[in-house]
Amino acid sequence: MAAGQTVTVYGAYGHTGRFVVAHLRERGFVPVLAGRDRRKLEALAARYPGLEVRPAPVDDPVSLDRALAGADAVVNAAGPFATTAAPVIEAALRAGIPYVDVAAEIEANADTFARFADRAEAAGAVVLPAMAFYGGLGDLLATAALGGLTSADEAHIAYGLSGWQPTEGTRLAGKVSAERRGGRRVRFAEGRLGYHTDALPTLTWPFPEPMGPRSVVGEFTMADVVTLPSHLSVPTVRTYMSTEAAGGVTGADTPAPTAVDARGRSAQTFLVDVVVRAGGTERRAVATGQDIYAVTAPLAVEAVHRILTGRTRTTGVVSAGALFDAPDFLDSLAASGHLAWERSAVVNPPVVG
């Protein structure tokens, strides 16, 4: 049961971190507010009397250990994860508690698998990166669509967002990733990550209703290119972004998200269309909902709940589709009203994309 269990939220005062804190409280957990900025932590604590504040610079192991002391798990919501993931994982391993993050940074997630896989497995620990809208949700949908299969010829994840107003954290993470890539773009083909300078194509993706066919930017590569291949044998993973959203997140003057309801969600809506092709069969899973940042919170908190209650399949550095029963996980999010989803299969489908 969640009642009374303590979860440290590193980066608690950030846009996504605040959603995580609120959802942990709704689920009966006791959040510990941690992060790099004491002033911001104390401002957040004023909204939640009784919650403990534990400032911790990311380069101070003693402070990080203090932030995680006595906690049952830690959720890292502080980007850029190229800077925060490794130190917080190290602290979680020292504390002997599960680590969950919401990183959408491709290289940071790849680094987590490469750097910590052996140590986490040897310790019997769970390190779960990219448990968020990008990376986690697509992985769950693809795994559910495959229905027990562990290999496919190719996977396509198309993001139909009504728009994208990026947070300050999203912009910073994008800047760090772009600098790390030297301006190049990422693709996953022939079973590996590669970098290129090709222009990104624009095409029409056949989203199901109520969205319908929509213009998308091809090879708008997201964290799914790390999470899916970490446990599925699939040589090609491609992700696509609706042109409205691509323009919004890259636009210099696009405003930050604005809350439109009591839960703090923006008006943004999403439809994630995952198509996995294996042999002559196309398997599809679709999820719909509101606000990509807000839906990350129930994804991460449900993951924490399942880890702490033993509803997991393995240990080590692992992605959502490998760690959990994907259809059951998605069903739980649907039952609680955080998203809707469905899946289907078609034999000998037409080629799309």
Image (cartoon, grey):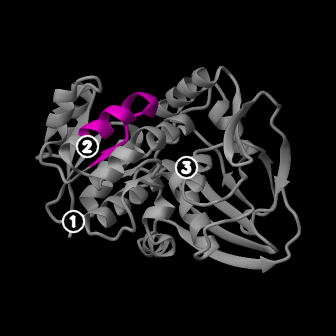
Residue at the spot x=54%, y=29% of the render? 171
**240 and 325: which is toward the camera:** 325
**66 and 339: which is toward the camera:** 66
- Read off the residue under disc 1: 2
- Read off the residue under disc 3: 134
**134 and 139: which is toward the camera:** 139
Residue at the spot x=83%, y=31% of the render? 199
Q: Say which quarter of the image contains residue 53.
A: top left
State how far apart marks 3 and 2 are (Cα). Answer: 23 Å
Relative to residue 98, is residue 148 drawn left or right?
Answer: right
Residue 98 can be seen, yes or no: no
Q: Are the residues tagged 2 and 1 within 8 Å (C-beta)?
A: no
Q: Which mark is residue 92?
A: 2
Q: Are the residues tagged 3 and 1 within 8 Å (C-beta)?
A: no
Q: Which mark is residue 74?
A: none
Residue at the spot x=13%, y=61% of the render? 4
State yes or no: residue 269 in magenta: no
Relative to residue 49, is residue 61 drawn left or right?
Answer: right
Residue 78, above or below 192: above
Residue 72, above or below 247: below
Looking at the image, tell me whether mark 3 or mark 1 is earlier in sequence order: 1
Q: Position of residue 214 (x, y in %)?
A: 80, 55
Quarter of the image with the N terminus in it: bottom left
Nearer to us: label 3 or label 2: 2
Quarter of the image with the C terminus in it: bottom right
Q: Position of residue 109 (x, y in %)?
A: 49, 41
Classed neighbour count for the residue bearing mark 3: other residues with Cα under 10 Å, few (<14), some (14–19), many (≥20):
many
Magenta segment, prevailing SS (helix, strand or loop)? helix
> Regarding mark 1 in the picture, which secondary structure is present there?
loop
Dot 1 amino acid type: Ala
Q: Which region of the structure is painted magenta?
A: 74-92
